[in-house]
Amino acid sequence: MARAKRFSPPCTISLLQVTSFKLLSLLLSSLCETQISLLKFSLLAGHSFNRLSEKMELPLIPSLPDDVTVDIVARVPRSHYPTLSLVSKSFRNLIASPKLYKRRSQLGITQHRLYAVLRNRKTGEFSFYILHRNLNGYNRLVPVQSLPFMSSRGSCVPVGSKVYVFNDLSVLIFDSTSHTVERAPDIPQRMSYKEVNVIGKKVYVIGDAFSHYVEETAWETVWQKAVTVFDTETQSWEPKPRLVTEDMAVGIGPFWSDSVVMDGKIYLKTRKKDCSSVYVPEERKWELMDEVLNSKDWKGACVVENVLYYHDHSGKALRVYDPKQGCWSVVNGLEEFLAVETARSGWCDAVNYGPNRLALFFPKRQYGEKMICCAEIALERRQGGEIWGKVQWCHIVIGGERFDMVEYVAVTV
């Protein structure tokens, strides 16, 4: 039997990468003379180099104003930041400062950083992992040690460079630039079985909430579907949840399998097709889901440039739904890759990974062991409206025997 050919995407180095390497070399060479002099002085004086450099609080680059240095560092790829943070305390502070990432945003050179929540099967703990981009080798998922364990019922959404984690009641804000966590106001009512989505600067939490009503002479407590809205700019909740009542002309199922945002609307998918629905925040109303969109079981989907993508396991294809065209199609150019890499995968999740690209996570067996793989796919719409995909890289990112993939989120930094 002929063995399937292993897919190996080409390796390319862009002009931007070459320019960034030159900037990094110039930056490090500018630091060398000052750092070597400091090291010699510290050795003669019997002091620790690190302790001395921290006490002196040297400027970032003595021959340049700090603002100019910030501009240089902002243009360097983030994959080099761990190296720069070793130069001095001043550089460590710069790499973790909001000022640097604000400048990157102003220069229009932001990048996407991908996180995943993994469940450890042995301990039952839920932890944040970051996709570590290695320019000289394979990309890997590594744990973010500075973050606490997550709740098993938490739901994550990105807002700029921050990740909001909504538990049944509490809310955490994870800053991806510094890997620190702070508390946000609690959800007004305890909520479970929820879907969380972002439109603009507002987060919509849709799920089961405690509701109280009077029947004859007794108070009754029941679970009722509700929409609770959090404003990330004012850091406050709407005074009252928007309850979903029975007189609304849609059937709201008990559980949702997935949800996405397109055209400012929240699409909630259930396994029972007659219960899938759409919430329109601006009008505060519910609608039935379009029959064509509802005809596919798009679990593990993502939206890129207002177009929905999901991996169809039975069809061995990456399917796409464009709300403007109102029909399903297939992403071209991925036939060989999907046939080789995902044919035996029990699941495959798509994640928005920036403009015109997505990431696919899927399990795979190699040498008798289960692994979790990730592939980055660039998307291109060609003449005639067809969408083509090109695999940028595909790597094993973590061993899969000990972990379950729970959730993914990509932030802009």
Image: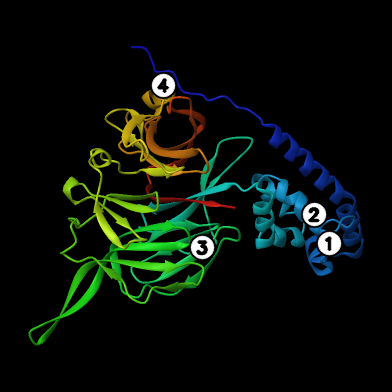
Query: The residue under label 1 is which amino acid type?
Result: Pro
Query: The residue under label 3 is which amino acid type?
Result: Phe
Q: Quadrant of residue 294?
A: top left
> Does the CB distance between marks 1 and 2 fall below 8 Å?
no
* Picture residue at 30% right of the left edge, 61% below the top: 194
Q: Is residue 97 visible?
A: no
Q: CA distance from mark 3 to mark 1?
A: 29 Å
Q: Quadrant of residue 384?
A: top left
Mark found first going from the N terminus, 4 or 1:
1
The percent coordinates of residue 350 (x first, y second) are 40, 41
The percent coordinates of residue 92 (x first, y second) are 71, 59
Residue picked out by circle 2: 69
Give whichever of 76, 398 is nearer the camera. 76
Residue picked out by circle 3: 174
Mark found first going from the N terminus, 3 or 2:
2
Q: Quadrant of residue 86?
A: bottom right
> Does the CB distance between marks 3 and 1 fall below 8 Å?
no
Quick check: 375 above or below 258? above
Q: CA distance from mark 1 to mark 2?
A: 10 Å
Residue picked out by circle 4: 336
